[in-house]
Amino acid sequence: MSKRYCMFISALFCGFLLFFLAAGAIAPDKTFSQVENRELAQMPAFSMKTVSTGEFMSKFETYMTDQFVFRDQWVAFKSIIERVLGKQENNGVYFCGQDTLITRFDEPDGEKVSGNLNYVNKFVENVDIPVYLSLIPTQACIWADRLPEGAPNASQTAVLEQAKAATAARWFDTYAPLWDHRAEDIFYRTDHHWTSLGAYYGYTALIRALGMEPVPLEQYTKTTVSEDFYGTVYSSSGVRWVKPDCMDTYVPEEGITVVSHTYDQKGNPVEEPRQLYDETFLAVKDKYAMFLGGQQSLGVVRTPNTQAPKLLLIRDSYSDSLTPFLTAHFSEIHLIDLRYYKLSVGDYIKEHGIDAAVVLYSVPNFVSDSNLVWLGR
């Protein structure tokens, strides 16, 4: 190797470093990643205390990773290289058949699962209305045949059996209707949620458990509201070669009102009008937030069926696309997200005359959630 060639390589490498140093210094910090749908780390506060404890360097490393110039392009490039090299997974997401991205389901913490089931049981003991429970299996379970051969994948059905056997609530099965329709588009291929069609089949299981008859699917008109939806699994995988999902709605929203209840900084209650379908979100990355306007600690959906009973859903975001189907059967649907709602659920039930409560989570969310403790208080 000649001296001139070595000098050229060294100069090229130095130029590469200088370019990214300069680009990083000039480029303004970003606060939010549309691709990953999350807040990005900001420059941490410098102090002798944070330096001595190592907190500053730890946060600074995260900051540099999040703010690295052309970060999205590098993540996409990394996933392409790994696919070329034969890897079938990136960031806990499997590259699966039929253009599907599936989040790996690892063996859950048995004590945490038992603890969360105990919190549900305490909730059943503390209220005077019927309480129903179901856990929703995800793509890793229902579409397991799409996974790469030999891909590690813990059993979600084992969690379902454990929950069914241990709960004091009235168990209803969402696995069977999803399994029976597994050949249909019941989940998004690029997101962790079920589609509106999958939510419909989950709705049929719940409504029958409540002693009602579901509205036949053929009585609805499917409306495709987006053909370019890329969800959370797409964002975390780094994959950029799969085709987008379609988003559909079935239930008309005429006559239905949605109100989100929050508190201001002084603790005063605040009511924020929302919609069953907020189509402004179809113009941004987080299109799934179209359903009910996205995350909220407490939401109340009211329908023209003023003589119908009132339902409370203790839920995760899967219920956002399920709720429209429930409007045919209830006068009010109250949705509580325990990540944000920290008041007494039992008191809320008494105050608002709730007739029945449903605890409904996806299996991965239920086995990892640390907020169900609020149910038992």
Image (cartoon, helix red, strand yellow):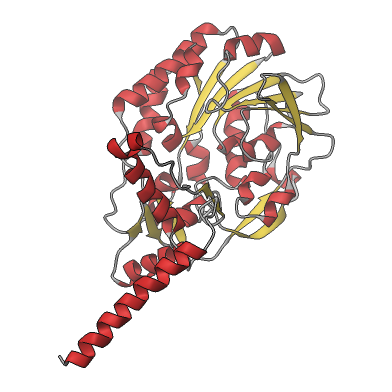
Name the image quarter holding residue 365: top left
From the viewer's side, name the closer residue of 228 and 261: 261
Q: In the displayed image of the protein, which residue is found farthest to the left?
A: 1
Q: Is residue 231 above or below residue 214?
A: below
Q: Position of residue 198 (x, y in %)?
A: 57, 44
Residue 98 visible here: no
Given residues 344 and 33, the one toward you in this image is 33
Q: Position of residue 26 (x, y in %)?
A: 51, 65
The answer to whether residue 243 shows anywhere in this view is: yes
Residue 351 located left or right of residue 318 = right
Q: Which quadrant would residue 243 be assigned to in this image?
A: bottom right
State left or right for residue 355 relative to residue 367: right
Residue 370 horizontal side relative to residue 310, left or right: left
**In which quadrant of the rendered view does residue 71 lie?**
bottom left
Q: Residue at x 44, y 16 (%)?
A: 119
Residue sitting at x 30%, y 77%? 13
Quadrant occupied by the N terminus: bottom left
